[in-house]
Image (spheres, helix red, strand yellow):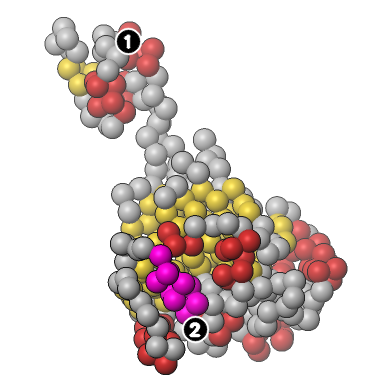
Amino acid sequence: MNMEAFVLGCGGMMPLPYRHLTSVLVRREGDLFLFDGGEGTQVSLRRLNLKWKKISAIFVSHTHADHVTGIPGILMLSSQVDRDEPLYIFGPPKIAEYIETSRRVLDMYINYEIVVNEITEPGVIFANEDFYIRAFPLFHTKPCVGYTLEELPRPGVFYPEKAMELGVPKGSLWSTLQSGKSVETPDGRIVNSEDVMGPMRTGRKLSYVTDTLYHKSIAENVRGSDLLFCEGMFEAGMEDIAAEKKHMTVTQAAKIARDAHVKKMALLHYSPRYTDHELKNLLGQAQGVFENTVLTRDRMVFGVPYED
């Protein structure tokens, strides 16, 4: 099952000609999940030729303008196509007021159901049969949350030769064994799933963290992520300014990645003070703490493969 993450924008505070505001789209088979939606989100969706009308849910970190001003356009655009499924929107308090006020003031024509859920405590907020999305608190100038998309463990590898040796003929009984159930062979023997299956395999984990002070609890929440999107607003040495503005430096972000034992960290939400050339210095600082760090760029695509 494929999982990909598309960086629709990687900038913070204000859009630049070459850097839209922070937004990440995650595609997991038939599901599309949008994390934040700053200015320029629709542009990148179009340039990447993504099927934006299939977005299942939008997850908002907080209601500062650089994270939500692209959402009204997406809501209006979605009314130009046939949409049967509701659109879910999650975010901290004020997100419902923002969506409702935007609809009223802009006199939006909406021909589908919008379900807004405000997050008031950490925990699972969205779930399907084999994955869930969890929210956890961040530490910004207003209520802010981070998100993790976590898959449930997968069944182990099925060994058909073992099934044949135990007298289980090829067919529907194999599917039953792969689903974790026991079967009875034609000669009356009971074969258990664990007799023909390898150990359970891990699922994948993707985390999204932006607009927050450094806090050790963040590492606990993103622990073991295959891919961590994390803000890198300021360069090392600007910890005082970062603390004042409730943001992190790239080395603080790298410390989270290191302590959480993530596999890869993708930096985003850079201050507009940094040119692309200067961002290379920030990357070097982060890699000095956590080597497998990359700088995101608008419309960059990350695959999230299984470990086993």
Q: Which residue is mark 1?
A: 164
Q: Which mark is residue 63?
A: 2
x, y (%) of residue 20? 66, 73
Q: Is residue 276 left or right of residue 15?
A: right
x, y (%) of residue 104? 38, 90
The secondary structure making up most of the magenta span is helix
Q: Earlier in the sequence, mark 2 or mark 1?
A: 2
Q: Which class describes the residues within 10 Å of circle 1: few (<14), some (14-19), or many (20+)?
A: few
CA distance separating discs 2 and 1: 58 Å
Q: Foreground residue, 205 or 94? A: 94
Report the span colored magenta: 71-81
Query: Which label lies toward us, 2 or 1?
Result: 2
Q: Residue at x 37, y 83 (%)?
A: 96
Q: Residue at x 67, y 57 (%)?
A: 300
The three-letter amino acid code for the residue at tag 2 is Thr
Q: Is residue 295 magenta?
A: no
x, y (%) of residue 186? 17, 9
Q: Residue at x 31, y 28 (%)?
A: 178
Q: Residue at x 61, y 74 (%)?
A: 40
On the question of residue 148 being in view, the answer is: no
**Does residue 199 lie above or below 301 as drawn?**
above
Residue at the outermost bottom position: 105
Residue 106, quarter of the rendered image: bottom left
